[in-house]
Image (cartoon, rainbow, N blue to C red):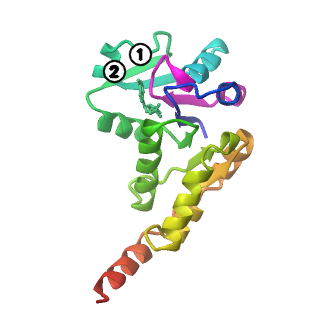
Amino acid sequence: MLKICVFCGSSMGYGNEYRDAARKVGEFFAANNIELVYGGADVGLMKVMADTMLEKGSHVIGVMPGHLVDRGVVHHNLSQLITVETMAERKQKMVELSDGFIALPGGFGTLDELSEILTFNQLRISDKPLGILNIKHYFDHLLQFIDHAADVGFVRKEHRDNIIVSDDIAELITKMNDYNPLEIGKWIADIKVESNHK
Ligand code: AMP
């Protein structure tokens, strides 16, 4: 994979382990000639990762809506900054540019981006893998919730199983390289049948 989009916190999280992990991701990308696409901010785990890569001379692309640039959170030393109008347009641009996506710990912004890619993948709007880097079990509760959603029939089991998870960046990328997009026809047929049962 040549370009990976990372979704992660505009905050640092408590303690050092989250920053250390973001730094490690930056180092891994730099060592493996992977370009970073991200939100373009100069704050939180986003900053740690971008700075680590820029220090090593790697290519970092930020994609940011103009209103956030005006708020002064933009990183000023990026290899490339793409300014867009809206948050929705930004996600579209990130999908266009990237070969895959990784979520690191983050808040609502990260959860929104992660869910949108999963939705794009289940609808085959995009066919690019999403990996969750489960640092310090950060995503365990979310994964448990998704398991529950699958158990009670709101997430299809195959869509749940297609979420790639690891706490190790090298392993995560290896698994992402083996990603198989799921066929959409059967799922749509199944939900139609289910909806016709009274
Ligand atoms: P959060 O997880 O709520 O901290 O939001 C971080 C995620 O949402 C990142 O992956 C960004 O793409 C996006 N985002 C949220 N806030 C900002 C910001 N101030 N600057 C750039 N991107 C942001």
For the residue labelled by badge 1, is the local secondary structure a helix, a strand or a loop? loop
Which quadrant: the C terminus? Answer: bottom left
Q: In this image, 188 relative to 173: left or right?
A: left
For residue 33: magenta?
A: yes
- Residue underneath mark 2: 68
Q: Residue 73: which numbered mark, if any? A: 1
Between residues 66 and 135, which one lies in front from this camera angle? 135
Q: Does the residue labelled 2 lie within 8 Å of ligand 1?
A: yes
Q: Residue 63: which numbered mark, if any? A: none
Q: Give the range drawn in magenta.
A: 22-46
Q: Does residue 37 appear in the picture of this structure?
A: yes
Residue 4 x %, y %? 55, 36
Between residues 53 and 8, which one lies in front from this camera angle? 8
Q: How many marks?
A: 2
Residue 81 x %, y %? 41, 19
Amino acid type indicated by mark 1: Val
Q: Is mark 1 within 8 Å of ligand 1?
A: yes
Question: Residue shown at 51%/69% (left/top)?
Answer: 150
Q: Which residue lies furthest to the bottom in this view?
A: 198
Residue 139 x %, y %? 60, 47
Q: Do the residues labelled 2 and 1 touch (CB within 8 Å)?
A: yes
* Dot 2 crowding, Cα within 10 Å, few <14, some 14–19, many 20+: some
The image quadrant in which ligand 1 is located: top left
Question: Residue shown at 31%/81% (left/top)?
Answer: 195
- Location of residue 71 (image quadrant): top left
